[in-house]
Image (tube, rainbow, N blue to C red):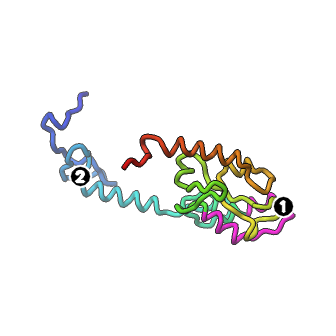
Amino acid sequence: MRRRSLRSGVKSMRCAKKNNRGWQCSKQAVAPYKTCVDCRKIASKAMAKWRAVKTKCVLCRRPSKKRRVCFRCTAKKAEQRHPEMAHDTGEHVRMLQGRHKKNARCQASGISLLTLEKMGEVLTVDRINPFKGYVRGNMQLLARYLNSAKGVQRKVPKAAVKRLRRKMVRYTHDKLSAARV
């Protein structure tokens, strides 16, 4: 079956939207849409409500926005890996929330969250001194690559920071994202 294009003279047709009783909308849909303006507004409001619904954490069943596991359960899970150390769960939760903010930066390299996301990296909460727990003053935000390169050392290797910055240059100085004045 051939489709008619806009140039062939078809400018409007009947709205294709049906309600739950099977009644079809009587208004005209303007091409290229198959539904009228009113039906599109109703559908977009319904989608906005659906997106705003809070999901529940899989572990504790508390409401959490668009997250499968809430920040509190994420912090508790990380702290359970080191039961012999003292932890400040409240501060750990604040750090986990802070790693998703727009102005968040990697402590070792200074690269912003936006640039890290372009490269496919994320920020993680790192313990500065690996022999202390998740307490205030012993946590920092690091790129996942640098956190794994650090291991059980107290400082991030300079070679790893250089490699991450070289990778950053490739992603930020491409034709699409480069700002030319």
Quarter of the image where the N terminus is located: top left
The label number, if any, that marks residue 131 in the structure image = 1
Q: Amino acid at mark 2?
A: Cys
Above or below 168: residue 91: below
Q: Nearer the viewer, residue 131 or 40?
A: 131
Question: Dot 2, crowdedness within 10 Å: few (<14), some or many (≥20)?
Answer: many
Q: Nearer the viewer, residue 103 or 70?
A: 103
At 72% from the left and 64% from the top, the residue drawn is: 139
At 67% from the left and 64% from the top, the residue drawn is: 60
The label number, if any, that marks residue 72 in the structure image = none
Q: Nearer the viewer, residue 74 or 11?
A: 74
Segment tinted magenta in the rendering: 76-98
Question: What SS does tag 2 mark?
Answer: loop
Tell me where residue 78 sits by quadrant.
bottom right
Q: Nearer the viewer, mark 2 or mark 1?
A: 1
Percent coordinates x, y for residue 39 in the rendering: 28, 55
Residue sitting at the far left: 9
Q: CA distance from mark 2 to mark 1?
A: 63 Å
Give the residue pinned by disc 2: 36
Q: Amino acid at mark 1?
A: Phe
